[in-house]
Amino acid sequence: MQRQGILFIVSAPSGAGKTTLCREVLDIFPGLRHSVSFTTRAPRNGEVHGRDYFFVSKDEFERMVRGGEFAEWAEVHGNCYGTALRTLAESREKGIDLILDIDCQGALQLKEKQVAGVNIFILPPSYSELRRRLEGRDSDKPDVIETRMNNAAAEISQARWYDYIIVNDQFPKAVEELRSIIIAEHQRTALMLAAVGNEFKL
Amino acid sequence: MQRQGILFIVSAPSGAGKTTLCREVLDIFPGLRHSVSFTTRAPRNGEVHGRDYFFVSKDEFERMVRGGEFAEWAEVHGNCYGTALRTLAESREKGIDLILDIDCQGALQLKEKQVAGVNIFILPPSYSELRRRLEGRDSDKPDVIETRMNNAAAEISQARWYDYIIVNDQFPKAVEELRSIIIAEHQRTALMLAAVGNEFKL
C-alpha cells in the first residue's frame, strides 16, 4: 500500500521570508512540489501553464467557483487565484507531497473545508525586525510599509491555530526547522502504518 | 516565559537498535538528557548514582510505589526499575528535554497516567531482518532468539498508538528521522507560543 501525499500549508506576514524558505525546501526534497494554483491573470514572461499556474479565463474561474471546485480562492488586485480540490486530491492519492504558500484567509478556507494538511506559520523575529526588513526594501514607500505592518499584525494573530510556528531569525536554522517538520510528518503513525502495516500486521 | 521541556518516549523490540539510536541523538542535542530511573539493583562497575540510575533499597522503592511517586515502574529479573513523576515534572519545568528509553508496558503506564510526551516507536525493517540481527549476536541461544521474536511481535502490536514510527533500516536515515522529530516537536505551536507569544501578543 502506497502512502498518501502530505499537504504542507505555509503562511507568513509579508517580510518573514516565506517564499525563500519554501524555495529552499523544494530544492532539498525532490519529492516535494509546489501546489499549482488556477489564476485569471495573464501569464508573465516565462511563466508556463501547468507549472507556474493554470491560466484560465474569468468565465472558467467563475464556473469552477460555482461548481465548488476550489479548496480556497481569493481575488487580489482584480485577479482571481484558487487552489482546486482536485489538485490536492490527485497529489494525495499519488503520494506526492505539496507545499502551498498561502495567506491566512486561504489557510482558514482549507481548515473550514477540513482539507487534511500540516499548517506551518513563519514569524519574523520581532515587529521591529520586520519593519527593518520592509524598510530595507527600497521599493516600498512609507505608507506601503505601514499597510504591510498592519496586515502583518492581522496575519500574525492567526498563528495560534497553526500546527507549527517557525521564527525566521537565522535563515539556515529556519530552513532546518522546516525541513525537520517535513521529515517528521512522514514518520507519523497514521502514514507509516500504510507503508509498513502489512509486514507487521498492524 | 521559558518553554517547557519535552519528554520523548522511545520504545522498540529488542534488536531494533533503539539504544544506539538514542545514544546518537543524545550526542547531537546537548540540551537533551536521558531520563534517570530509580532501581533496586546494585550499581555495576563505573555506574554513578544520579547519572546512570538512582540506586535505592527495595524498602525505599516500595515506599515510593505506595506513595504513587512513579510515572511507571516494573520488576525485571527480580529487580525493580521506575521513573519518578518528580523527575519528569522537574525537567518539564526547567525546560530540559528528556529521552526515556522504555518498553511498551512502561509507555502504556505513562499514557494511562496522562503524562505529556511524544511517543516514538522504532521498528526493524522486517521480521526476517530482526531474526537475522538477533542470530548475528553470538551470545543468544536459539530458544532465547525464539523468545525474543515472540516478545518482539507483542511489542510491535503496540506501535499503532504511538505518535511516530521510525523504521531502522539504514541507521543514518533513522538517526535523521529521530533528530527531525525532536526538532519539529520544538516548533509545535503550543510550545512556541510560550517562547514568542509575548512579542507578538499571541
Image (spheres, coloured by chain):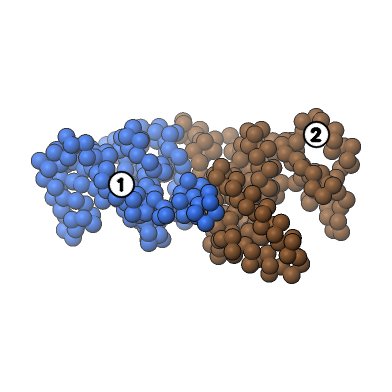
Chain colours: A brown, B blue
**Discs 2, 1 touching: Cβ within 8 Å:** no
Q: Chain of mark 1?
A: B
Q: Label 1: which residue?
A: B89
Can residue B85 be seen at all in this image of the molecule? yes
Amino acid on which disc 1 is placed: Ala
Pointer 2 indicates a residue of which chain?
A
> In the displayed structure, does residue A177 sit left or right of residue A46?
left
Image position of A19 with respect to A71: above or below: below
Q: Nearer the viewer, residue A116 or A32?
A: A116
Residue at screen point 66% across, 60% down:
A15
Quarter holding the N terminus of chain A is: top right
Left or right: residue B67 compared with residue A128: left
Residue at the disc numbered 2? A65
Q: Amino acid at mark 2?
A: Val
Q: Which residue occupies 24% across, 48% down?
A: B37
Q: How many marks?
A: 2
Mark 2 and mark 1 on one chain: no
Location of residue A23 in the rendering, given as x and y in whole percent from the top left corner = 67, 58
